[in-house]
Image: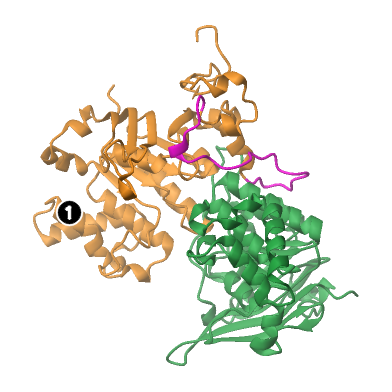
Chain colours: A orange, B green
């Protein structure tokens, strides 16, 4: 079966080679994304999790062809996205829609809700008449749970709450009936009390067959809603697998540290076991395993060998990029 | 009865609009905090928690009308106007904000800005201030030689540490922190929370932490105060608030937090918080509440005791007939 979206060995390098800084100094390339592979099937929700600067947003931008990758392939329904012409891409764009973190910035403040949701229809020439398009807009509003939909048509973005705005931006993405939705931190700007509503909405869309890639820095959100989680660190996926396996049996020390740092709903006794420092800049990539300078269990080998991601042998589909991960006899 | 370090009494904030209309933001909030105590102030956006902190710091714009009192060791710091406020700001009360980036002048080194914060308050030479700046940076986990660097040379987490060092410059006794870790990653967040805890334990700093993140409060704080539509609807020891939330709003708020069990459903709170200006005759939470009785719609609940230092404003949790006459703040003594 062909994956809805299959990303293979994706790499994105900024200022690679040709870039020149102030006074003509040659700039070192910054490898923001390195050898990232993941896939999404229809009806599946994949979460890319990581700290800021881990490359998760860059990865999805390259996956949606908003950025030109420097390595790897992105296949959407079997078609190589970066090998298609602009014209072909335009048709594919309808199938791949994005929503962003900040519904305060992603909606045009001068347009009414109807115009915001209708815009993609006009751009793609969908609907033969205004009445036609209005019907599609109303349908999209219903789908995102804004009811009665008619009452939202004439509203301006500033008249809506944060949760309603995010629903409008999801409606504007859904109105083209895409097969894949890419959501970049869809709830992190929203109040805790409305987050679950938006995530439930995405979950419902997933159940109807939409494939979703969600970028988040919140592991607990990912755990509750994603089928699979990929944990990124400094541009690489360091661990991936079914959500439950990642949450209950993390194999990479970075994932373990992330989980330990998530505030728990209980009083803590004693101090937090913490990773010290912060993730280094991608322009000063450590040798060997990129996590070794902060890793609590690193051995000498970790300083020289860059570990490849491979099966952990614990759960099918569970992979980690760590020399010290459990090794199976077949590994 | 001992005098608490910080006592906020019946604090009310209204904003006067250009058309002379009054927007009510904070409605008669009272709370107390003792040295070394950590209190989490939680609630949805717009409930007034940040405004409450800014009012206590005397940092609200001129169109804000503040009444009530903010007492430090029993002395009302709001009473003397801006002149008196200046004497208390930084030394008694200090504040850190969510966007630590905006707290600094981008064109000057962070060290010089911390030194300035001390010299402006007087009583210290530049030399002594420079020494203390290095100590402060060390305290918050930043190598002291980075005092010579500019704000943009720090990452978000590091900048928040520098902001904390600056807030601590004049030995404040109460730290007001407004979502200090919201913009940070979990690992940075844990580091900052650890640091805040250390400061309260080692220096007896009292912390009033505004956050929308309940697990942070459960993990870090001794007390929780839940704000809704300008009022504190429940406050008490964190263990009681967490394990036996009394107010339906508190209960629903806790239900919105994803738990450790990945199969458990996460609740969302229906509806949106009302505008505090509207002040319905009954309980402001009644329209969203799942437990209302008749009285909820026509009579505003008064604060009633749940336990020692545990108060809720709810007709259902504290039935009126069993409700002894409690003046706000009394049960805190």
Percent position (x, y) of residue B89? 68, 76
Taking the image as drawn, is residue A113 in sight?
yes
Q: Judging from the image, what secondary structure is the residue with disc 1 in?
A: helix
**Image-based side of A81 in relation to B92, left or right:** left
Residue B118 is drawn in which quadrant? bottom right
Residue at the (16%, 39%) spot, across then down: A89
Name the residue nearer the viewer: A311 or B293.
Answer: A311
The residue at 53%/56% (across/down) is A192
Dominant secondary structure of the residues highlighted in magenta in the image: loop
| Viewer can see residue B256 | no
Q: Which residue lies furthest to the bottom in this view?
A: B20
Q: Mark 1 points at which residue?
A: A121
* Numbered label tally: 1
Q: What stretch is highlighted in magenta?
A: A263-289
Report crowding for label 1: few under 14, some 14 to 19, many 20 or more residues within 10 A (C-alpha). Answer: many
In the displayed structure image, the side of residue A288 where residue B251 appears, left or right: right
Give how far across and how far down residue A285 sits, in percent. Answer: 47, 33
Q: In this view, does A122 lie above or below A272?
A: below
Q: Which chain does the residue under circle 1 lie in?
A: A
Is B221 in the magenta? no
Residue A279 among those drawn in magenta: yes
């Amino acid at each position: 079966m062909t994956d809805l979206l299959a990303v293979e060995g994706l790499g994105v390098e900024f200022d690679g080679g040709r870039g020149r800084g102030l006074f003509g100094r040659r700039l070192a390339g910054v490898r923001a994304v390195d050898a990232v592979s993941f896939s999404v099937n229809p009806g599946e929700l994949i979460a890319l999790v990581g700290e800021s600067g881990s490359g998760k947003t860059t990865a999805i931008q390259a996956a949606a062809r908003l950025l030109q990758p420097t390595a790897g392939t992105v296949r959407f329904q079997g078609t190589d996205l970066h090998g298609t012409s602009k014209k072909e891409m335009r048709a594919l764009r309808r199938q791949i829609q994005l929503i962003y973190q900040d519904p305060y910035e992603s909606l045009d403040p001068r347009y009414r809700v109807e115009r915001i949701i209708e815009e993609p229809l006009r751009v793609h020439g969908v609907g033969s008449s205004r009445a036609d398009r209005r019907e599609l807009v109303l349908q999209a509003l219903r789908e995102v749970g804004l009811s009665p939909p008619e009452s939202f048509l004439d509203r301006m973005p500033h008249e809506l709450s944060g949760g309603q705005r995010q629903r409008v931006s999801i409606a504007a993405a859904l109105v083209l009936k895409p097969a894949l939705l890419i959501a970049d931190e869809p709830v992190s700007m929203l109040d805790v009390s409305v987050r679950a509503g938006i995530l439930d909405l995405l979950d419902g869309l997933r159940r109807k067959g939409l494939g979703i890639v969600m970028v988040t820095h919140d592991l607990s959100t990912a755990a509750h809603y994603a089928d699979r989680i990929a944990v990124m660190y400094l541009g690489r996926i360091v661990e991936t697998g079914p959500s439950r396996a990642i949450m209950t049996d993390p194999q990479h020390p970075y994932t373990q540290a992330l989980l330990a740092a998530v505030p728990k709903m209980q009083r803590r006794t004693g101090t937090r076991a913490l990773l010290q420092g912060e993730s280094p800049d991608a322009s000063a990539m450590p040798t060997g395993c990129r996590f070794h300078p902060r890793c609590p269990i690193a051995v000498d080998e970790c300083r020289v060998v860059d570990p490849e991601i491979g099966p952990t042998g614990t759960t099918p589909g569970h992979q980690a990029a760590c020399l010290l991960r459990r090794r199976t006899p077949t590994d | 009865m001992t005098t608490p370090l910080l006592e906020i009494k019946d604090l009310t904030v209204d904003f006067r609009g250009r058309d002379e209309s009054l927007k009510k933001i904070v409605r008669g909030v009272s709370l107390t905090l003792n040295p070394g105590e950590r209190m989490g102030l939680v609630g949805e956006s717009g409930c007034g928690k940040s405004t409450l902190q800014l009012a206590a710091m005397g940092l609200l714009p001129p169109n804000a009308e503040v009444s009530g009192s903010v007492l430090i060791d029993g002395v009302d710091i709001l009473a003397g106007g801006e002149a008196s406020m200046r004497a208390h700001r930084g030394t008694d009360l200090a504040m850190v904000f969510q966007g630590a980036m905006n707290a600094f002048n981008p064109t000057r080194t962070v060290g010089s800005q911390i030194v300035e914060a001390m010299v402006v308050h007087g009583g210290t030479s530049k030399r002594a201030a420079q020494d203390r700046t290095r100590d402060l940076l060390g305290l918050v986990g930043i190598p002291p030689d980075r005092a010579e660097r500019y704000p943009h040379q720090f990452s978000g987490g590091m900048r928040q540490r520098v902001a904390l060092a600056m807030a601590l410059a004049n030995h404040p006794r109460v730290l007001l922190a407004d979502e200090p870790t919201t913009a940070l990653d979990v690992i940075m967040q844990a580091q900052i929370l650890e640091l805040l805890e250390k400061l309260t334990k080692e220096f007896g700093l009292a912390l009033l932490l505004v956050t929308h993140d309940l697990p942070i409060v459960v993990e870090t704080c001794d007390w929780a105060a839940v704000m809704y539509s300008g009022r504190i609807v429940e406050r008490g020891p964190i263990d009681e608030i967490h394990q036996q939330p009394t107010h339906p709003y508190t209960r629903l708020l806790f239900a919105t937090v994803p738990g450790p069990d990945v199969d458990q459903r996460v609740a969302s709170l229906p509806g949106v918080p009302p505008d505090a200006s509207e002040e319905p005759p009954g309980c402001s939470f009644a329209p969203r509440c799942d437990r209302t009785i008749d009285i909820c719609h026509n009579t505003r609940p008064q604060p009633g005791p749940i336990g020692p230092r545990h108060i809720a404003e709810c007709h259902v949790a504290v039935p009126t007939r069993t409700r002894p006459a409690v003046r706000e703040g009394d049960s805190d003594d």
